[in-house]
Amino acid sequence: MSVGAALEQLLRLIYRQAMKLAAMPEDERDSHYDFIRLSCCAAAERIGQSPDKAAVTANDVVEFVRALVGIIEVGCGSDQGRSDDRPAALPARHFGSRESGTARV
């Protein structure tokens, strides 16, 4: 698998996790963030990072996911008439697709 393909797959995974976490109550998210941290740390060590560097990488990924969750919550905060506290689902984005949102000439 190419580095680009692996990165694209990782970003899709992070996006899906952030959407799921944003739909959860805040007090239920910590165990999921811990799981992400442990999974990322193990993966980073498997590709050759030192345990210390892998821990830093894993923490960076968790902070990135937390930031995405915050963005999703703010973006969904303008929804009116929601009957529950969960954010509305955002339209699916297809990372790496040919549709970049810009017109071709």
Image (tube, rainbow, N blue to C red):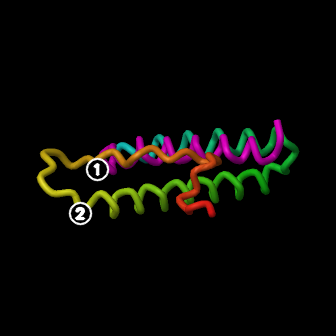
Q: Residue at x 23, y 63 (%)?
A: 78
Give residue 101's position: percent from left, percent from top: 53, 59
Upstream in sequence: badge 2 or badge 1: 2
Q: Is residue 52 left or right of residue 74?
A: right
Q: Judge whether residue 91 is colored magenta.
A: no
Disc 2 crowd rating (10 Å Cα; few below 14, some 14-19, many 20+) is few
Between 66 and 42, the one lying in front of the other is 66
Q: Amino acid at mark 2?
A: Ser
The residue that mark 2 highlights is 78
Residue segment shown in magenta: 1-27
Query: In the picture, which quadrant includes the N terminus?
Result: top right
Q: Is residue 88 left or right of residue 98?
A: left
Which mark, residue 104? none
Q: Quadrant of residue 9?
A: top right
Q: Is residue 63 left or right of residue 86?
A: right
Q: Amino acid at mark 1?
A: Pro
Q: Residue at x 58, y 41 (%)?
A: 13
